[in-house]
Image: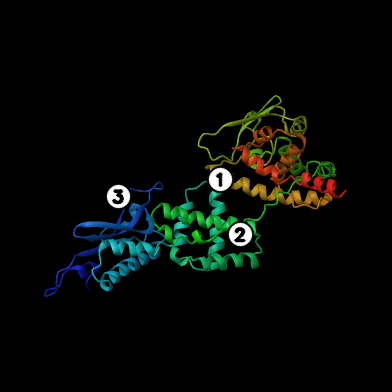
Amino acid sequence: MNSPESENLPTKGRTRTNTISFTVELGNKPKKDGHYPLFLRITENRKHRRVYIGFDIPLKDWNPNKKEVRRSYPLHEVINKKIDSIKSDAIRLKADTKNVTSTVIAESLKGRSSAYFFQYAYSYIANKPYNTQRNVRTEINKFLEYVGNKELFFADITVKLLADYESWLRTKKGNTTNTISKGLSKIRTVFNQAIKEGILPVQDNPFLLIRLKEGKPERVRLTEEELKSFQEVALPQGSLLWHTRNYWLCAFYMAGMRFSDISCLQWKNINGNRLSYVMQKTKNTVTQSHTIQLPKQAEEIIQNYRPTKPLPTDYVFPILNPNKIYVTEADILKEISRKNALINKYLKKICFLAGIPKDLSFHSARHTFADLGRKKVKDVYAISKLLRHSKINITEKYLSEFDTDTTDKALESIFG
């Protein structure tokens, strides 16, 4: 049986044309994760063009003689099937197109967006921070649930498919406009990265023709009256409900501290009446310490947890297991996420007991602080620094969503 390469040899009696051959090879350089990209090499008159096949594999899992992925690699069947498919497409293009060149074949194959969307998406998030992995994977899994096909090509994802998917999210999943927009934006991120890496031509991006609709986010916060009810509702001392309220109130008093920072707070972060710590959530490679005066209300709560002789690295609050060793950052973030979900459930129970008809979460402590700060302090810069926002316009947008008092008072003035 002749190999595909044998079809490139000129036959006796035919007019000689440009010789074009195809072979599959690994790239010369590994990517950041150590995997090598797979290419279809198109050779014409000793000049090469390469088309990315859409997969990256470890060097040890490539058989250079058979030009295929070894069985040792989990996705060997899928990738080898893709190799056969793209070679067949290339040979067909060569046979069916008059005076075809390697450039035409390469551009045509690229134009078909022949990479598998889900394989690329999961590969893309593999080396991302844990929270990014979790958020993007959730949306990719949801999209996979809808299409039901792991071997979906980028080219198969059309504007119509995304519109149908949006309808499914709304009717079957009950997602809000804002949730749908955030989910689609994660899929758009995968497309943008594929274009950046040259896997997908920019004109094949369906998101160029889609405008994501963003609903106004509901930032749940407590009013001063509700905050008083939350503080005063009777809870059994030492119970998880009691601890949950303490965590939430401390976060509120400490300028809207995030749950990840509350969880990891250590005694070395508290020096007298000052609190100094490095935020868990940061996009900067160089982390910066944040320091504030510790309000007396927070100090009173913290005293419930202070042992006789605390070690500097001991956790202040009994949220994370002090005896557990977290090998990677992802391990500790996964545990924080699990604890956060549990605490949010108990916050809803506290609200029920306190007669507060709101879907309170731990992040609501941040919203409550921002709203109270807006009402009592007119210095947006000071509030911005306390909230640890990177830019003041973020704070301005954040606070504007709470500012219904101004419009309410205006209407009262007009209509009495």
Q: Disc number at residue 180?
A: 2
How far separated are the C-alphas under marks 3 and 1? 34 Å
Provide the secondary structure element on which disc 3 rests: loop
Are dots 2 and 1 in contact, CB under 8 Å?
A: no
> Mark 3 = which residue?
28
Q: Residue at x 26, y 69 (%)?
A: 94
Q: Nearer the viewer, mark 3 or mark 1?
A: 3
Q: Is residue 79 above or below residue 351?
A: below
Q: Quadrant of the N terminus?
A: bottom left
Q: Disc number at residue 164?
A: none
Residue 366 location (% of width, % of height): 70, 42
On screen, residue 385 versus residue 23, left or right, reads right
Q: Is residue 135 visible?
A: yes
Provide the secondary structure element on which disc 2 rests: helix
Q: Is residue 395 above or below residue 15?
A: above
> Mark 1 = which residue?
331
